[in-house]
Image (spheres, grey):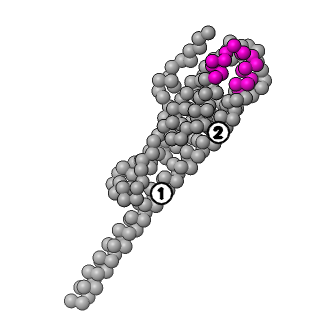
Amino acid sequence: MLPGVIAAIAVIFGIVILLVVIVIGVYNSIVSLRNKVDNSWHQIDVQLRKRYDLIPNLVETVKGYAKHERETLEKVISARKMGIDAKTIKDQAKAENMITGTLKSLFALSENYPNLKADQHFSRLMEQLNGIESNIAYARQFYNDMVMKLNTRIQTFPGNMFARMFNFTTRDYFEIEEATAREPVRVQF
């Protein structure tokens, strides 16, 4: 009888140890994904800051050639400020959609000013901005991939139990607005 009790205690102890290992594993995987999401957001932020730093130079260059295009230039500056001031991912996405739209208008303006288009400083700024835009697109894709993994982990069993227990929450995707992304740029004079 005594060996049977010891065996039962050993089995119960083994089950408890197994459950503890599973809890630790699930918890650590959620924390790891959360940290990857945070890191990938910081990578987007780095690229956005580069873009924000470049925008005033672009605006100043365009001002020299297109003095009467004040409204477009003010929209670019306003969109930049909105991006810098954004506090949430949804606010940031909204601001970035606005910046993308206003930059498209700014680039469309350059088509009407051959001297601006030929300006070496403007060309270098455009090349830098194109590189930054590519980096932003890649960083956004990576961020959204990490958000999908985190949200999936949090929303599926057994992760959903631990997510509630430890207050893990889903994250928002950093999405572009389909309407502005697919429409041609319209410039009116």
Quarter of the N terminus within the rendering: bottom left
- Image: magenta residue range: 58-74
Q: Nearer the viewer, residue 2 or 125?
A: 125
Q: Residue at x 29, y 77 (%)?
A: 11
Residue hosting label 1? 31
| Label 2 secondary element | helix
Q: Left or right: 64 with respect to 42?
A: right
What is the spatial separation of the Cα atoms under label 2 and label 1, in whole angstroms?
Answer: 27 Å
Q: Is residue 50 above or below residue 60?
A: below
Q: Position of residue 65 (x, y in %)?
A: 75, 16
Q: Is residue 20 above or below residue 64?
A: below
The residue lying furthest to the bottom in this view is 2
Residue hosting label 2? 49
Q: Residue at x 39, y 52 (%)?
A: 154
Residue 124 visible to the viewer: yes
* Residue type, numbered disc 2: Arg
18 in the magenta segment:
no
* Residue type, numbered disc 1: Val
| Label 1 secondary element | helix
Q: Quadrant of residue 77?
A: top right
Q: Residue at x 65, y 34 (%)?
A: 52
Q: Nearer the viewer, residue 128 or 45?
A: 45
Of mark 2 and mark 1, the one earlier in the sequence is 1
> Tag 2: Cα neighbours inside 10 Å, few (<14), some, or many (≥20)?
some
Q: Residue at x 44, y 49 (%)?
A: 150
> Tag 1: Cα neighbours inside 10 Å, few (<14), some, or many (≥20)?
some
Quarter of the C terminus within the rendering: top right
